[in-house]
Amino acid sequence: MAPLTIVTTVDENGRRWGFTASSVTSGSLEPPLLLVGVDRRSSCHAAITSCREFVVNVLGEQHRDLARTFATHGVDRFAGGELDYWPDSDLPCLLDAKAAFRCVSSGTLAVGDHDLLVGSMVATRLNVGGTPLLWYQRDFALPAREAGVVRNPV
């Protein structure tokens, strides 16, 4: 089980890129680092792994359709207009994300068929309340009120 995120960036030409990721984890507390798993076959692999900065947007249950869109190949993932920009930047972000982490890229590490993008966190946005969207047994899920119980959304 993992929280779902949308990882976004902008390339040197101003084109926005992003994908749905469940492979995001803390890499270090000091300094604060995030690791993002990026499939080498992803259409945005080159843009994400060569970017200067990126944003990790932690999704809530209201973002289920957006998570599907950002996981779909061959579509304009930004067409719906749900994403805005990180204040004072051109980085796309989801303003109502449960949490969002702006990171400066610190390089990549090759791991199997993925690259781990290492990001140094430089800013954080938090939104309290609501239910996080999880990835569980290859499907969307929500945590249940009872500890340790996961329920699949209808």
Image: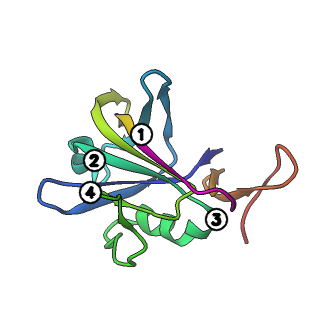
Is the residue under label 1 in contact with that under label 2 (CB below 8 Å)? yes
The label shown at residue 89 is 4
- Side of 124 relative to 59 (left or right): left
**Cα gap from disc 2 to disc 3, whole angstroms:** 25 Å
Q: Quadrant of the N terminus?
A: top right
Is the residue under label 3 in contact with that under label 1 (CB below 8 Å)? no
**Cα gap from disc 4 to disc 1, whole angstroms:** 21 Å
Q: Residue furthest right?
A: 146
Please tell me in which quadrant of the rendered image residue 11 appears. Answer: bottom left
Of the numbered discs 4 and 2, the one sitting upstream in the chain is 2
The label shown at residue 36 is 1
- Residue 77 x %, y %: 35, 69
The residue that label 2 is drawn on is 48
Of the numbered discs 2 and 3, the one sitting upstream in the chain is 2
Q: Quadrant of the C terminus?
A: bottom right
Residue depth check, mark 4 versus mark 3: number of the one nearer the observer? 4
**Cα gap from disc 4 to disc 3, whole angstroms:** 27 Å
Determine whether the residue tagged by mark 2 lies in a helix, strand or loop.
helix
Q: Which residues are magenta?
A: 123-131
The residue that label 3 is drawn on is 61
- Residue 69 x %, y %: 44, 69
Kindly identify the residue that appears in the image at 55 percent across and 67 percent down.
63
Kindly identify the residue that appears in the image at 52 percent across and 64 percent down.
96
